[in-house]
Image (tube, helix red, strand yellow):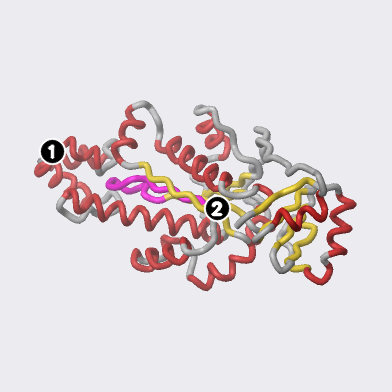
Amino acid sequence: MPQTVYQLPAAMLENMKTYYTESLQTPPQGAVFRAKTANTTITAYKSGKVLFQGNNPAAEAEKWTGHMKEKPAQPKKPAPKSTMPPPDSLLSGSHIGSDEAGTGDYFGPITTAAVFVRQEQMPLLKELGVKDSKNLTDTTIRQIAGDILALDMPYSLLVLRNTKYNKLKKRGWSQGKMKAMLHHHAISHVLNKMNDAETEGILIDQFCEPAVYKKHIAAEHEHLHENTYFMTKAESYSIAVAAASIIARTSFVKEMDQLSNQAGLTLPKGASGKVDQAAARIIKSHGQDFLDTCAKTHFANTTKALNKL
């Protein structure tokens, strides 16, 4: 959808709100007003940013901006705030959520997703059955993921496959650092697809202390995005994190299916004794090097599998 954003003075925002009186809608959190005309949706924020979206947003914006130039997106300063838990206004407002799957599984990659959910989309997602993917079957997850991806919802999905995972581990990367960088890049990709005025913040399903997360990404010359929050079991409270959880889990399940076909046997999830037996069968039939393509070989399961041979 075409869109344009301007930075306008507070006095003008009041004039605009009066002008659009008959077109006003319920505004999102942090907004002064939202109005919808025949061709354009206008959302004005307390920061002074005004977002015009629709078939011809420039024409509507011209009424107020005249010869003003569109305000270019400014790079975020590396001085964000991060707290845990996030404010209630974030959970009920438009925000980005991120989650990952596959970190505790010996076989398969790590899949990470970030999704931007608008406040007005939340009731629909709940109707679709979006909730913590751990409480859903693989079949249900696939169906809901398809429904989510059919919506106008900016998202990013990253897959760290086993060959790259094992190389990073040999370079000294911890799994925590891999996860931090995956979340960071997935969120960055979503932010690049939207205007930052639309979101009230970012919520990451917490897997480490915020200070450790910031240390991991700082080691790769990255900075925490502004208004980023961390929360344990966030998928139970945030519809955006729950949607990200479903997308990530669906990708993990699909990757496991492909790896099972390549290995010639159904690869079990988790890291149980069944996993040890499957790894031993793979080593016997394909050789130990094949494990690098389908398993996180630093797990203790590798040693246990070798002991079974």
- The magenta span reads 101-114
Q: Tell me where residue 285 appears, x and y as whole percent.
A: 9, 44
206 and 37: which is toward the camera: 37
User: Measuring 45% from the left and 66% from the top, which residue is drawn there?
Assistant: 147
83 vs 99, left or right, is right
Q: Secondary structure at mark 1?
A: loop
Which quadrant: the C terminus? top left
User: Measuring 78% from the left and 69% from the top, which residue is drawn there?
Assistant: 23
> In which image quadrant can residue 57 be found?
bottom right
Q: Secondary structure at mark 2?
A: strand
Residue 11 magenta-highlighted: no
User: Measuring 44% from the left and 38% from the top, which residue is drawn there?
Assistant: 176
The mark found on residue 287 in the picture is 1
Q: Tell me where residue 123 appears, x and y as whole percent.
A: 59, 70
91 vs 20, left or right, is left
User: Measuring 40% from the left and 33% from the top, which residue is drawn there?
Assistant: 174
> In which image quadrant can residue 33 be found?
bottom right
Q: Residues within 10 Å of mark 1 (few under 14, many from 20)?
A: few
Residue type for callout 1: Gly
- Between the C-alphas of marks 1 and 2, the distance is 40 Å
Residue under pointer 2 = 97
